[in-house]
């Protein structure tokens, strides 16, 4: 077969493959994040700023809190969880539609904070079922 | 070559001037933001080196079968009662027996919050660090889980988290793959409360444990240290622990 | 100047592919084990709060110590100016890099949080010997690579001596740093000694040469290339002296400890009452790892036989692993003397010997790292001109004779 014909056949196969692989995405689409209304009033900064900058703010503040013992700062992960914990699950990460989990799933950024940090508010009253038995 | 300004050169000058201004702004702006953050930080309270937190334990008041301090620590920090060699223990009761006389006594052993901590020296990322007020902590954002500090601690004070955790206390984040130990209940101290073990010991009626500022000569802990002899465990290592024991 | 004919191996024989496949499978098993350990946590291993460093560290420290020693063979040519050994140099440099990479891989994969490797490589506490070691290890890789380049590329061969000297000094500092990981620890009676750094340097000479012999003999026996008696005899003699020097340091270390009443407890444990640890010390480290290989290399007839030398080298490696096990595990098994003179009891295993039962994942991780090093060597000899076509006596004589 001539080289031109071979290339055209290769191109056709590639196009077919690309079509097949993208079909699921074209049909389903990624679920939009669910933003449940948070408790409390105004957040630390406007939502547009928070969306972009919350990690930078947290990473900067955590150095001050952990290493220098600064408490009660404007940026406070526990306060974030207190306000943003879902009324249904009592958490920001327990279900895929909880506040933090839902956006992070949408943008595909791994959420590792709650491997160590509690995903539930400080006041047990805000959480429907909080039975702290302790963990090894 | 002539000195007359052409439209092109004027436009170029404006561009260069604008770019230089923008560059200067970009260069200075982060500094201004951080400066503002620093000022805000100074306004909030941070740990001060004028203070040195310490513990004083009167072993003559410590009951052999009493584990009030251990139980309180577990409850406060969200630790399960240990059953396996991989379970974390931030404080434990140690029973000492003199082989010659057969006499024994009991005391709690936890991170000694040394002034010269070997764990801080050996940590490759400075995750193990000493806060300005003397509390030795693990910055678990930086800990890579190499466990070198566990090898280095002469008091076997540190534990490693060997599995995934859930249900952590909001004030006490802890997770798999990092090293941890007694924090002197830093979350309580920063709220002007006492460590859980000290409070529980007092509540049990024994009152063997005292917490306070070693640097303040008027504090209760300093007065008690002056009143009766106290020692540091393995004082020969010259680590200057912040925990002292009486009745040893 | 006589041209040294270095040549890649064919690398297409069934034997090569079988070896490649086996080593690849073992390395893959190690990688899978690491993933399992990382996702489930160290609960799946035998390590705990008492024995915090286990089998992976035994393998890793062995590989790292061997890596710095493996470069010695090349150093004999460039640093000590024994041109006779020049044909052996390229394989030596490559082997050093391969062993180090294997050891580092094990260490990194065993971390509690290997995802924070970037943190480890960018945040340093320079009071920690661990932090220094990270720079020393990566620097060694770079230096060894440059050194290898000067050996293989004629246009830069005039820098070989400089590169060789730099690499030699660097590797001494590196091994000192590795020994000091333990030597600096005041907490453990089995460590806390300035002896450990020079002891590790002596050990690196032994382990490194043994690893080199294994690679060298396997390469020539496997490809059917000529392997002369002279080179084997010289390397065997060297191995003998290195074993003696290592035995010297080990002896002085333990004798000094035995002299001090404070240290008698841990010494009695390791040398007499430690069960498997004692068996590994006397049977593994001393007998199999030192005395039997010594007898083999000093034997008038066997000392010139390639199979006897291969056996001796393999025994040295086995003995070295035993030695690392006794050092690393044994040092942790002995409880910390919190209150000297008292017997202790607690829920946190104070006052009792700490037990360690290695699990399959950590054994696979350790062995996988070793397999990875071997794989790197296997690939290196196929794609790089690391070894002379003939290791017969005339190759070496030509190098030694051709002095400018």
Image (cartoon, coloured by chain):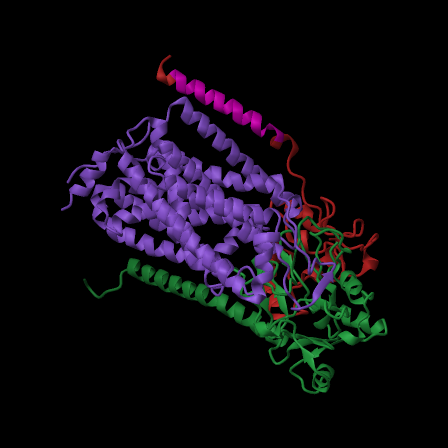
Whether C23 is drawn above or below B53: the answer is above
Dividing the picture into quarters, in which one does residue B67 lie? bottom right
Closest to the observer, B150 or B53: B150
Is residue B145 among what the camera can see?
Answer: no
Q: Quadrant of the N terminus of chain A?
A: top left
Whether C168 is drawn above or below C288: the answer is below
For image coordinates 74% across by 58% down, the residue present is C347
Percent position of residue B175, x then y: 67, 54
Q: Is residue A80 left or right of residue C9?
A: right
Q: Which chain is green?
A: B
Q: Which residue is outermost to the top?
A: A1
Dividing the picture into quarters, in which one does residue B6 lie? bottom left
Secondary structure predominantly adopted by residues drawn in magenta:
helix
Is residue A126 among what the camera can see?
Answer: yes
Dividing the picture into quarters, in which one does residue C362 lie? top right
Q: How many marks?
A: 0
Percent position of residue B138, x then y: 61, 62
Residue C363 painted magenta: no
For image coordinates 69% across by 80% down, the residue present is B230
Percent position of residue B5, x then y: 26, 64
Whether C108 is drawn above or below A83: the answer is above
Q: Which residues are magenta?
A: A5-24
Residue A10 painted magenta: yes
Q: Which chain is purple?
A: C
Closest to the observer, A46 or C291: C291
Q: Colour of chain A?
A: red
Q: Is residue A122 left or right of residue C79?
A: right
For image coordinates 80% across by 55% down, the residue present is A132
Percent position of residue C128, x then y: 49, 62
């Amino acid at each position: 077969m001539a080289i031109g014909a071979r290339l055209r056949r290769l191109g056709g196969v590639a196009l077919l493959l690309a079509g097949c692989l993208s079909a699921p995405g074209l049909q389903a689409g990624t679920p939009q994040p669910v933003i449940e209304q948070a408790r409390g009033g105004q957040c630390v900064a406007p939502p547009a700023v928070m969306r972009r900058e919350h990690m930078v703010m947290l990473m900067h503040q955590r150095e001050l809190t952990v290493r220098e013992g600064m408490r009660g700062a404007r940026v406070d992960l526990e306060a974030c969880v207190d306000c943003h914990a879902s009324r249904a699950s009592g958490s920001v990460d327990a279900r895929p539609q909880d506040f933090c989990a839902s956006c992070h799933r949408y943008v595909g950024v791994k959420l590792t904070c709650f491997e160590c940090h509690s995903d539930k508010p400080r006041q047990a009253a805000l959480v429907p079922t909080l039975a702290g038995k302790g963990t090894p | 070559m002539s000195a007359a300004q052409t439209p092109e050169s004027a436009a170029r000058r404006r561009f260069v001037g604008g770019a230089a201004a923008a560059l200067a702004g970009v260069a200075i702006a982060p500094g201004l933001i951080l400066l503002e953050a620093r000022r805000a930080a100074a306004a909030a309270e941070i740990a001060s080196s004028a203070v040195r937190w310490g513990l004083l334990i009167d072993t003559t008041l410590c009951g052999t079968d009493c584990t009030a301090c251990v139980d309180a620590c577990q409850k406060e920090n969200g630790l399960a009662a240990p059953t396996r060699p991989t379970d974390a223990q931030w404080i434990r009761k140690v029973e000492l027996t003199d082989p010659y006389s057969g006499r024994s006594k009991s005391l709690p052993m936890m991170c000694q919050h040394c002034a010269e901590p070997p764990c801080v020296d050996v940590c490759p990322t400075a995750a193990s660090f000493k806060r300005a007020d003397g509390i030795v902590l693990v910055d678990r954002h930086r800990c890579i889980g190499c466990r070198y500090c566990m090898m280095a601690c002469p008091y076997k004070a540190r534990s490693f988290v060997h599995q995934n955790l859930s249900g952590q206390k909001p004030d006490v984040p802890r997770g798999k793959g990092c090293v941890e130990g007694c924090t002197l209940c830093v979350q309580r101290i920063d709220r002007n409360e006492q460590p859980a073990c000290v409070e529980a010991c007092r509540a049990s009626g024994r009152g063997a444990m005292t917490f306070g500022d070693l640097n303040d000569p008027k504090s209760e802990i300093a007065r008690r240290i002056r009143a009766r002899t106290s020692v540091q465990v393995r004082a020969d290592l010259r680590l200057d622990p912040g925990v002292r024991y009486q009745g040893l | 100047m006589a041209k040294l004919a270095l040549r890649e191996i064919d690398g297409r024989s069934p034997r090569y592919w079988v070896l490649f496949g086996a080593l690849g499978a073992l390395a893959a098993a190690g990688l899978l084990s690491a993933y399992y350990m990382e996702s489930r946590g160290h609960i799946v291993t035998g390590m705990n709060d008492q024995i915090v460093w286990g089998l992976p560290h035994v393998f890793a420290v062995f590989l790292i110590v061997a890596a710095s020693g493996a470069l010695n063979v090349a150093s004999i040519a460039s640093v000590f100016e024994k041109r006779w050994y020049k044909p052996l140099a390229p394989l030596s440099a490559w082997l050093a890099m391969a062993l180090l990479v294997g050891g580092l891989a094990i260490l990194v994969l065993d971390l509690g949080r290997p995802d924070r490797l970037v943190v480890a490589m960018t945040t340093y506490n320079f009071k920690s010997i661990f932090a220094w070691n990270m720079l020393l290890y990566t620097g060694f890789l770079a230096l060894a690579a440059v050194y290898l380049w000067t050996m293989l590329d004629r246009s830069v061969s005039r820098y070989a001596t400089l590169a060789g000297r730099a690499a030699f000094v660097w590797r001494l500092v590196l091994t000192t740093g590795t020994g000091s990981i333990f030597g600096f620890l005041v907490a453990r009676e089995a460590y806390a000694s300035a002896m450990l750094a020079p002891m590790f340097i002596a050990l690196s000479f032994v382990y490194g040469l043994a690893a080199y012999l294994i690679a060298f003999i396997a390469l020539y026996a496997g490809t059917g290339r000529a392997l002369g008696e002279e080179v084997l005899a010289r390397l065997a003699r060297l191995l003998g002296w290195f074993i003696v020097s290592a035995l010297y340091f080990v002896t002085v270390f333990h004798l000094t400890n035995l002299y001090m009443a404070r240290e008698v407890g841990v010494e009695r444990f390791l040398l007499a009452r430690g069960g498997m640890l004692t068996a590994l010390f006397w049977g593994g480290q001393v007998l199999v790892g030192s005395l039997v290989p010594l007898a083999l290399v000093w034997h008038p007839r066997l000392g010139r036989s390639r199979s006897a030398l291969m056996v001796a080298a393999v025994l040295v490696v086995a003995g070295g692993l035993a030695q690392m096990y006794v050092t690393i595990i044994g040092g942790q098994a002995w409880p910390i003397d919190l209150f000297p003179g008292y017997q202790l009891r607690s829920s946190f295993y104070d006052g009792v010997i700490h037990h360690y039962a290695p699990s399959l994942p950590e054994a696979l991780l350790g062995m996988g790292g070793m397999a990875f090093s071997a794989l790197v060597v296997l690939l290196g000899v196929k794609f790089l001109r690391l070894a002379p076509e003939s290791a017969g006596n005339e190759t070496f004589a030509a190098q030694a004779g051709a002095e400018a």
